[in-house]
Amino acid sequence: MGDRVLVNKLAYRFGDRPERGDVVVFDGRGSFLPADAADDGVLRGLSRRFGSALGLSDPSDTEYVKRVVGVGGDRVRCCDGRGRLVVNGEPLTEAYLHPGDVASAVRFDIRVPEGRLWVMGDHRSDSSDSRDHLGQPGGGTVPLGRVIGRADWTGWPPGRWTALSAPSRGTAPKADARG
């Protein structure tokens, strides 16, 4: 929280799709916010995007940074007997969780629709994520078309410069393998 991330906006532009474990930036309108949430207008929007790209202004209030926990077809549930998230029948090891946080205090069991993502923050006790939007249209999932890019680096503050990796990638079988 309060970190600035460097976003690779080309990561998913040439056929690649977000994978489990990726940290993505997305526009929350239509999933986390009403579809008609305030737009900045053309001039202010361009100014904000340019300033944000240079790290000079805050990102839009409609943009979120979250980790992909489930992709289209995945069954994601909370939790197993040891308090771990389970994806396609396999428990996740989430070493990236904020110290002291549990996988989720909210119980859920969802099949992620094709073309959508189930996303959660790494600081689960202080994150507004897919769990908070379960009863809304889309069931808390984010459309792939709303993904802006992949967050590859924490760039600010200087003491927190680090690459953002996807340590959980591949820890759960594909959705068609188990369910």
Image (spheres, grey):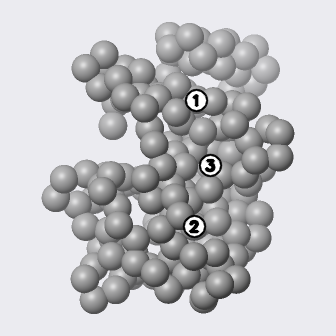
Mark on residue 28?
3
**Mark 2 residue type:** Gly
Q: Residue at x 54, y 36 (%)?
A: 151
Front residue of 129 and 7: 7
Q: What is the quadrant of the C terminus in the image?
A: bottom right
* Secondary-structure class at tag 1: strand
Q: Is residue 159 left or right of residue 100?
A: right
Category of crowding for the residue at label 2, using alpha-carbon neighbours closer than 10 angstroms: few (below 14), some (14–19), many (at least 20): many
On the question of residue 156 being in view, the answer is yes
Q: Element type at marker 3?
A: loop
Is residue 76 depicted above or below 25 in this figure?
below
Residue visible at 65% across and 13% down in the picture: 50
Which residue has dot 2 on it? 70
Give the image quarter of residue 34.
bottom right
Dot 2 or dot 1: first in sequence order is 1
Q: Look at the picture and state if 175 lies above or below 146.
A: below
**Which residue type carries mark 3?**
Gly
Q: Nearer the viewer, residue 3 or 47?
A: 3
Residue 86 location (% of width, % of height): 44, 79
x, y percentage for residue 22?
A: 54, 49
The disc labelled 1 sits on which kind of residue?
A: Val
Image quadrant where one finds the N terminus: top left
- Observer-side mark, 3 or 1, equals 1
Q: For mark 1, what is the residue?
A: 7
Question: From mark 2 to mark 1, how far is it between C-alphas?
Answer: 20 Å
Q: Is residue 148 above or below residue 118?
A: above
